[in-house]
Image (cartoon, rainbow, N blue to C red):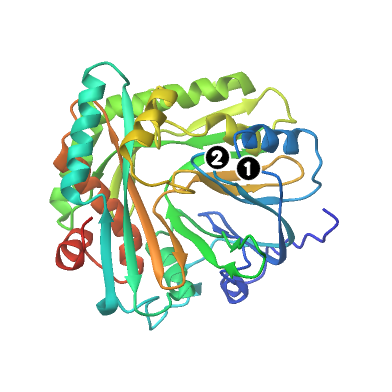
Amino acid sequence: MGTDMHLTRNQEAGKILQHYKPSGSFFFATPKYTMLTEGTLSLIEGLEGVTQRDEILSLIREKKRNGRIVGAIPFDMNVQARLYECENVHITSSLCKEEIPNETKSGLDTSKIVMTSVPNEEQYKADVSEAVRLIERGDLEKVVLSRKLHVTSSEKVQIKPILSALLRLNPQGYTFSVPLSVTSLDLQTQTNVTLLGASPELLIRRTGIEVTANPLAGSIPRSDDPIEDQKRAENLLISTKDLHEHALVISNISAALRPYCKHLHVPQKPSLVATETMWHLSTEITGVLEEATTTSLELAMAMHPTPAVCGTPTKEAKQTIDKIETYDRDYYTGMIGWCDEEGNGEWVVTIRCAEIEENELRLYAGAGIVAGSKPEDELAETAAKLGTFLQAIGVKEARKEMTLSRRDQ
């Protein structure tokens, strides 16, 4: 890269947040470490359009870059990837709650916001019914349908307090911030957009020749009642519908990784993973690479998009999404992460996230639709998933607040 790499592993982790700048930093916090870039983030040009996937793979395979690449890759590869060469990288230990600033003020005044669901709740349920009809007809096995929540504030959104809230609410997740700034065609103005989120789902981690993937599929909202919450978790583990959905994802990801691995271990049964708002079926897949030159980004691209965020078969699921969803997902259900000069790296699925621009937030959530899916249940699942980010901005209950203040369209 021609730039210095600063890895500071022993400094107080909390200090790293003092240097975070939404418009110029790549931030990535995991249960094991925290990463922040400082200085110039140089956008890798020429990554766009239908050839983008091949261009990214060529970029890595030909070893044209001699340092760390960070950034975001979209769901639809026709949208430009935001991959950067970074000037300075700081890595510390994971953040303790005591090290995270407890902001006295939220990122926005929730009494001065308007929320708009796209599609509205009734239309989303109708979309789920249509997807189930296509599945029962044999057109596909699974499709993930999402909805978008526009949140508009009367004031500019403050990003740092939201990042701190996400870190406190999701200590076992992957909290991230990626700049998506857009420059106008005449180069006169720049729009600052930040992709912020707290994903529970590891797409791929490569450390030396060892790889780990941790797909999540099959979910149920949590309950505030401990007895009911435990009952929901136990029922999820034996749910025929959710186990089928999970099996589709595991089969696909295992098939994608197997050509790269001389050993691949896939547990026979899933386990449970809990977030602040959801229970998920989880399977941790581990493997040993056949070739030590295979990079984390190559593996991530081979898996993307997984049935956990798209469906199966992939082509038919993607066509169904394009037909039913009335907006572009952009970076939602894409992936964010990093890859260093040795090929090591970590990439997570871009979910539980929002794009923030001036006084607006665009939140996303989706649900996996299979045979037997019920529209009311899938709507409730998306509401619970939206709750991760809504809690971070001070909105406690997504469904209640949307009923009170949304303007459906």
- 22 or 319, nearer to the observer: 319
Task: Tell me the element at label 2.
Answer: loop
Few, some or many residues within 10 Å of mark 2 (<14, 14–19, 20+): some
- Residue 290 lies, in percent from the top left, at 68, 22
Residue at horizontal 26%, vertical 56%? 117
Residue at horizontal 58%, vertical 29%? 302
Q: Is residue 213 left or right of residue 13?
A: left
Q: What amino acid type should be assigned to the residue bearing mark 2?
A: Asn
- Residue 32 lies, in percent from the top left, at 55, 54
- 245 or 368, nearer to the observer: 368
Q: Which residue has dot 1 on it?
A: 48
Q: Residue furthest top?
A: 138
Q: Is residue 231 left or right of residue 396?
A: left
- Residue 225 lies, in percent from the top left, at 14, 56
Few, some or many residues within 10 Å of mark 1 (<14, 14–19, 20+): some
Classify 347 as above or below 290.
Answer: below
Classify 195 as above or below 126.
Answer: below
Q: CA distance from mark 2 to mark 1?
A: 6 Å
- Residue 55 lies, in percent from the top left, at 69, 36
Q: Residue furthest front?
A: 186
Quadrant hosting residue 215: top left
Q: Which residue has dot 2 on it?
A: 78
Quadrant including the C terminus: bottom left
Residue at horizontal 71%, vertical 50%? 44
- Of mark 2 and mark 1, the one earlier in the sequence is 1
- 106 or 127, nearer to the observer: 127
Mark 2–mark 1 CB contact (< 8 Å): yes
The reply to whether residue 382 is in sight is: yes
Residue at horizontal 42%, vertical 70%? 162
Q: What amino acid type should be assigned to the residue bearing mark 1?
A: Glu
